[in-house]
Amino acid sequence: MIRSMLYATDLGLYAPLVMQHALALARTFNADLYVVHAVEPMGLFAESVLQSYLDEQALNEFHRQGLKTVIASIEQRVLDSFREELGDEGEQDLQRICAVRVVQGDPAQVILDQVRKLSVDLLIVGTHSHGVGAETPLGRTATRVLQLAKVPVYLVPLMERRRRGDR
């Protein structure tokens, strides 16, 4: 029985398509839906640029408060995009969403950690890949999640790949 699901979003171009699948599944199973988006840690270059402009105290404050502000902003953006996509008649679907979490870390690890922490019964992800053509049918994150997930994974193929493959 599926009582709860986790939709992992990259907030990319095809996120609304994957979201529609997630909400349809939540409706079908009358399940709770959690949403997670992973924010990759700041790279060494960005960190060194900040260190050159900020003293240690300001840098620590940025890491504490700045990241919280950015994460809260992304969480709000996700909810706003759901509201915009669903319109007024989607209020019931929005109520299925128990939480939107933005977590810093390696995307695959963040997703797998959230699956475990939330004890969800199903994981929903898209096949997004930054590669070109059919030689990269799955992105790095989707591949790792499929390999390591302890729950069933609902994988949504993205339209861009279908169009490229048709050529």
Image: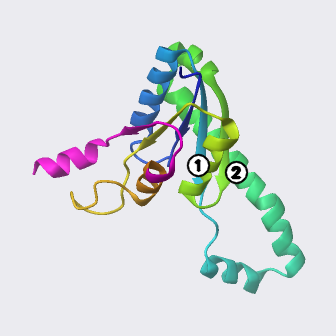
Q: Exactly how many numbered labels are in the figure?
A: 2
- Please name the colour scheme applied to the rendered image: rainbow
In the shown orientation, is residue 141 left or right of residue 119?
A: left
- According to the image, label 1 marks what residue? 112
Magenta-tinted stretch? 147-167
Amino acid under label 1? Leu
Whether residue 119 is situated above or below residue 63 in the rendered picture: above
Whether residue 125 is situated above or below residue 21 in the rendered picture: below
Q: Residue at x 45, y 42 (%)?
A: 125
Gap between marks 1 and 2 measured at Cα: 19 Å
Q: Is residue 50 magenta?
A: no
Q: Position of residue 99 (x, y in %)?
A: 68, 33
Secondary element under disc 2, as helix, strand or loop, is helix
Q: Position of residue 18 (x, y in %)?
A: 42, 36
Dividing the picture into quadrants, the one containing residue 98 is top right
Q: Which mark is residue 11?
A: none
- According to the image, label 2 marks what residue? 71
* Furthest-right residue in this view: 57
Q: Nearer the viewer, residue 40 or 30?
A: 30
Dividing the picture into quadrants, the one containing residue 3 is top right
In the shown orientation, is residue 104 left or right of residue 20?
A: right
> Counting residues from the N terminus, which is met first, the one under dot 1 or under dot 2?
2
Q: Nearer the viewer, residue 22 or 68?
A: 22
The local crowd at label 2, few if under 14, some if 14 to 19, many if 20 or more residues have their Cα within 10 Å, is some
Q: Position of residue 13 (x, y in %)?
A: 40, 46
Amino acid under label 2? Ile
Q: Nearer the viewer, residue 148 or 32?
A: 148
The local crowd at label 1, few if under 14, some if 14 to 19, many if 20 or more residues have their Cα within 10 Å, is some
Q: Residue at x 39, y 39 (%)?
A: 155
In the shown orientation, is residue 71 left or right of residue 123?
A: right
